Amino acid sequence: MIFNSVSYLLFFPIVVLLYFALPYKMRNVWLLVVSYYFYMNWNAKYAILLAGSTLVTFVCSLLVSHFRERGKTSLAKWSLAGSFIINLVILFAFKYSGFFAENINRLMEVIGQGARISAFDVVLPVGISFYIFQALSYTMDVYRGEIKATKNLLRYALFVSFFPQLVAGPIERSKNLLAQFEEKHSFDVDRIRSGLLTMLWGLFMKIVIADNLSGIVTQVYDNYLEYTGVEILLATALFAFQIYCDFGGYSAIAIGSARVLGFRLMENFNCPYLAISVNDFWKRWHISLTSWFRDYLYIPLGGNRKGKVRKYVNIMIIFLVSGLWHGANWTYVVWGGLNGLYLVLEQVGEPLRRRMRDIFRVDVTRFSYRFFAGLWTFALVDFSWMFFRAESFSQVFGMLRQIKANFGFSRMFGYAVESWGLDVTSLTALAVAFALLFFVDVCRYKGMDLNRKILTQGAPMRYVVYATLLLMIMFFGIYGYEYAQTAFIYFQF
């Protein structure tokens, strides 16, 4: 069951109605049951992994708290280590064992050894990277004394498995979400309308923009020798918006679903393609994961407290690990490494850029400066997306050779549109959708609460907004055979 499916359209209203109809004491039980039901729709047996990770971190956190209170620091550290080791072993076994075995076997072939390691061949459990990171952050927060370990297993299990953000985040912190399960949420019409509007916008991003772009990007990437360099570059730029609208759409639906029930989830995206530097981009993209690596890896490694060289090494480490977190493929590692390198070079070169701005009296607040800085940032980020999207290095290098050999501006606007299967209506719908996306992001960038602005308008204006989004989803959304849903990109991570 995923957010853009008919089953979720039936599931969610039932969950909401019964949640508010039940007594307060039964509501968390109901949410836990439906969260596990939601997860088991993919593969019921993998609910055991979810429950196992939950139980391990719950027990280890109680031990950490117990030993810290009695001044037994070494035992608290061992309890923390036990939580991390067990969970990371689970993550490695199900996500990285095949990757590890494949690379060891290649190394054996290079050095002339005949021995081979058998891979642990299993289907990757949906959302495993997300819920394990969320559970581990809880244990670390308890160890640091930032929160007290809860003794309520049901409440903690719900924190780990809460269905709106279980499969692809946002990766919530215990300081934000766990305490909310102790609150009493009332049936608030204004809050519910706000949540539903956020969900509607998320569906628009996913079904109208991301899924329409998916067909174009797949067509070009799978058959790149049939396209010119400029078409490959355009497809890569479109992929940047595909993954933004796909993952940003998921996050919006998750945040909206939680808001309807009365819960507040953290924002995961904040107008990332309006960033004017790579550092700015990573403050706006997948915020929950970026901040997780900052708080639980970068700072423990020393952060920026041990000199500039160590700081740059730490930045590279977290981006390489982030790349590997996204998938068991060297292309993801290179994607992460490229972004880490961008950030390091940006910080190394900042004193020189600042001096040049002073010499030439460049006003960084002017639109022209921000426009070209944003364009340069997008170009760097977009190049790294090529490694993220490609299935192998050979595909990346093949596309780069094609770009160099046959750039081909001449057939860009006519042939490309025709070969991508776009007619005038589809092209117009995409243009309108992009215009809406740009408008919404600019409003948010300027600090405007567009959701609230819409909901405080009169009924005619509100219903124009609702009708516009619904009609575009109905007529220009992409649906599979018999209206089957299309999966979200981040489900594979």
Image (cartoon, rainbow, N blue to C red):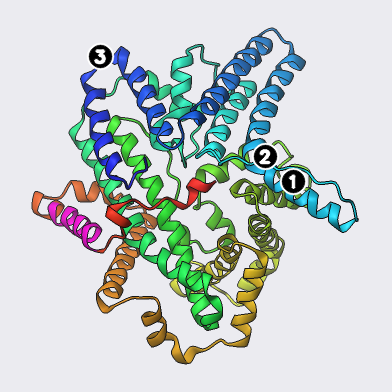
Q: How many marks?
A: 3
Quote the CA–CA distance across marks 3 and 1: 51 Å
Q: Which of the two discs, 3 and 1, sits closer to the camera?
A: 1
Q: Which mark is residue 231?
A: none
Residue 416 in the image: x percent, y percent? 42, 82
For label 1, the crowd category at 10 Å Cα-Cα, with few meaning under 14, some 14 to 19 and many 20 or more, is some
What is the three-letter code of the residue carrying label 2?
Phe
Disc 2, disc 1: CB below 8 Å? yes
Residue 78 in the image: x percent, y percent? 74, 19
Q: Which mark is residue 120?
A: 2
Q: Which mark is residue 23?
A: 3
The residue at the far left in this view is: 460
Write down the region rendered in magenta. Answer: 463-475
- Please state if 41 lies on the left or on the right of 231 as rendered: left
Task: Give the mark, 3 or 1, whose residue is nearer the N terminus.
Answer: 3
Q: Which mark is residue 101?
A: 1
